[in-house]
Image (cartoon, grey):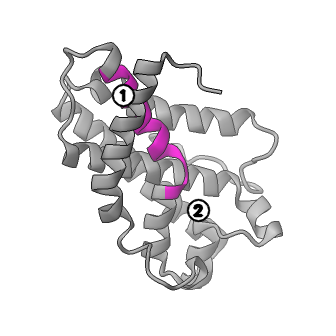
Amino acid sequence: MNCLPPELYRKVKDGTDGFFRTSLEQMTASSDNDHHRSDMSVDEYLHHRAINAGGVFGFVEQCHILQWLHPNEKQLDEQLLLDLSSNVGLHVALANDIYGLERDEKTGDLNIVLKYEKTRGCSRDEALYWAVKHMQKSYLDIRSICSEHPDTIPAKFQVALDCIGGNHGAHEICKRYRLPGEFSWPEECLI
């Protein structure tokens, strides 16, 4: 059931559909090949997860809702929104796969940390460190884009940072997902 006023719902839907029609093809070009996700390289799968983890859709829809509520606020141009969306999606995907690691291992679901561990022949700790390093880079990229464009909707209303913070917080309190084994976030971790 839709709880938004009809005019807002139409604008959000049209804006989100337009954004994805023009940019999702670029983002998924490497993921739309005929091969199966399990056959993807680590980089292809990381790209695929960044788009499909759910963070991108919520982020873009929030930006469109805020633009409707604050029509005089500056929006990011499409390329910067795409860059910001990719980083939000990547951060959400990596957090999801870190927290879901043990569950995914039991169920056989694809997981970027498990894929990296298997593909690179490294230890679980090394794979987790790799994932955390990528999360930190995406966080810093998000902060950089927002800092360079402080008067835009995503920066002014902290949409991107709230999306990744909310995802991380949800995992912290959710019984379905747990940090793996003895893993703890590194002290120098920025997320």
**Residue at image coords 42%, 35%:** 13
How far from the left and from the top, in percent, is residue 67?
Answer: 30, 22
Residue bearing the label numbered 1: 11
User: Is residue 137 rendered to the left or right of residue 148?
Assistant: right
Q: Is residue 20 above or below residue 38?
A: above
Residue 121: percent from the left, percent from the top?
59, 85
Looking at the image, which residue is at 57% across and 82% down?
36
Q: Position of residue 1 (x, y in %)?
A: 65, 27
Taking the spot 38% from the left edge, 75% from the top edge, the residue there is 30
Is mark 1 in CB contact (under 8 Å) with mark 2? no
Q: Depth check: 184 or 140 in front?
A: 140
Q: Amino acid at mark 1?
A: Lys
Residue 35 lies in the magenta stretch: no
Rendered position, 96 above or below 153? below
- Principal secondary structure, stretch drawn in magenta: helix
Is residue 189 among the parts visible in the rendering? no
Going from N to C along the chain, the mark reached first, 1 or 2, is 1
Residue found 48% across the figure and 34% down from its top:
163
Classify 10 Å Cα crowding around label 2: few (below 14), some (14-19), many (20 and above): many
Q: Is residue 59 magenta?
A: yes
Give the amino acid at mark 2: Leu
Range shown magenta: 52-67
Q: Which residue is mark 2?
A: 128
User: Which type of secondary structure does the marked residue at label 1 adopt?
Assistant: helix
Residue 190: image quadrant is top left
